Image (tube, rainbow, N blue to C red):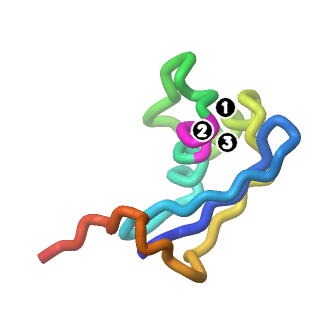
Amino acid sequence: MAFTICYSFEGSRVVFDHSAESLSDSNAYYLSLLHSGCAFHEALPSGGTFQSIQDYAKRKGITDLRWHKALVVDPYLPKAYEKA
């Protein structure tokens, strides 16, 4: 399964697909932080609440995050781990 994640960063709208079995709001924020590159300067918060990761992302410049199941799956996107 694939998901499309959209967010605003430094005045631009960014859209990317991510292959996974499932996705949550917290996961989408973590992935957008990694995708934007702004998370590489310091350790990401872990074990916190959704509000803490959302606040951290906003401080780093990630806003207006949205995600949904991908409408079209890129054939070159790595497949999510499939359970046997």
Residue reaching furthest to the top:
41
The reply to whether the C-beta atoms of the residues labelled 1 and 3 are less than 8 Å apart is yes
In the picture, which quadrant includes the N terminus? Answer: bottom left
Picture residue at 56% right of the left edge, 81% below the top: 72
Q: Please identify, in this view, whether the residue under mark 2 or under mark 1 is nearer the observer.
A: 2
Q: Residue 21 occupies which quadrant of the picture?
A: bottom left
- Residue 44 left/right relative to 80: right
Say which of 54 and 43 sits in front.
43
Tag 3 residue: 54
Q: Which residue is mark 1?
A: 56
Q: Residue at point 79% right, 47% down?
A: 8
Name the foreground residue: 27 vs 32.
Answer: 32
Residue 7: x, y in percent? 73, 52
**Which region shows up in magenta?**
32-36
Q: Which residue is mark 2?
A: 33
Task: Decide whether residue 34 is among the magenta residues.
Answer: yes
Q: Are marks 2 and 1 in contact (CB under 8 Å)?
A: yes
Are the residues tagged 2 and 3 within 8 Å (C-beta)?
A: no
**Quick one: which residue is furthest to the bottom in this view?**
71
Q: Quadrant of residue 17?
A: bottom right
Secondary structure category for the residue under label 3: helix
Cα separation between marks 1 and 3:
5 Å
Q: Name the residue type under label 2.
A: Leu
Quadrant of the frame with the C terminus: bottom left
Identify which amino acid the numbered label 3 is placed on.
Gln
**Which amino acid type is shown beneath numbered disc 1?**
Tyr
The residue at the far left in this view is 84
Q: Is residue 46 above or below residue 77?
A: above
Q: How many marks?
A: 3
The residues bearing labels 2 and 1 have C-alpha atoms spaced at a distance of 9 Å
